[in-house]
Amino acid sequence: MSTNDDDNVRAAAARKGSPFLSADQAAHYLGISRRTLNELLEHGKGPPLRKHGRQNRFHIADLEAW
């Protein structure tokens, strides 16, 4: 399976549930470690966050656009 096919499978699986992902889920979706995601966010280079109460969430569309 090619990388593009892997991405499509991952996106389809994520869309079956909520379009909002936790940081762990977003890192997995992007194929990076949670630590790398945190470092990107600290330097203002990560995907946009959305606040849901006290929780930070990532929308799948934002991850795909990023």
Image (cartoon, rainbow, N blue to C red):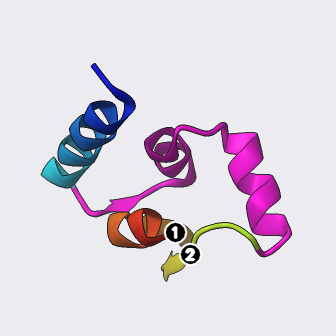
Q: In which quarter of the image is residue 41?
A: bottom right
Q: Mark 2 belongs to which amino acid?
A: Leu
Image location of residue 34, percent across then percent down: 67, 42
Label 1: which residue? 66
Image location of residue 10, percent across then percent down: 29, 39
The residue at 56%/45% (across/down) is: 27
Numbered tag placed on residue 49 in the rendering: 2
The span picked out in magenta is 18-44
Q: What element carries label 2?
A: loop
The residue at 50%/79% (across/down) is: 50
The residue at 74%/70% (across/down) is: 45
Image location of residue 37, percent across then percent down: 69, 52
Q: Main secondary structure of the magenta part?
A: helix
Q: How many marks can you see? A: 2
Front one among 48 and 8 = 8
Left or right: 17, with 45 as reference point: left
The N terminus lies in quadrant:
top left
For residue 33: magenta? yes
Image location of residue 19, percent across then percent down: 27, 63
Nearer to us: label 2 or label 1? 1
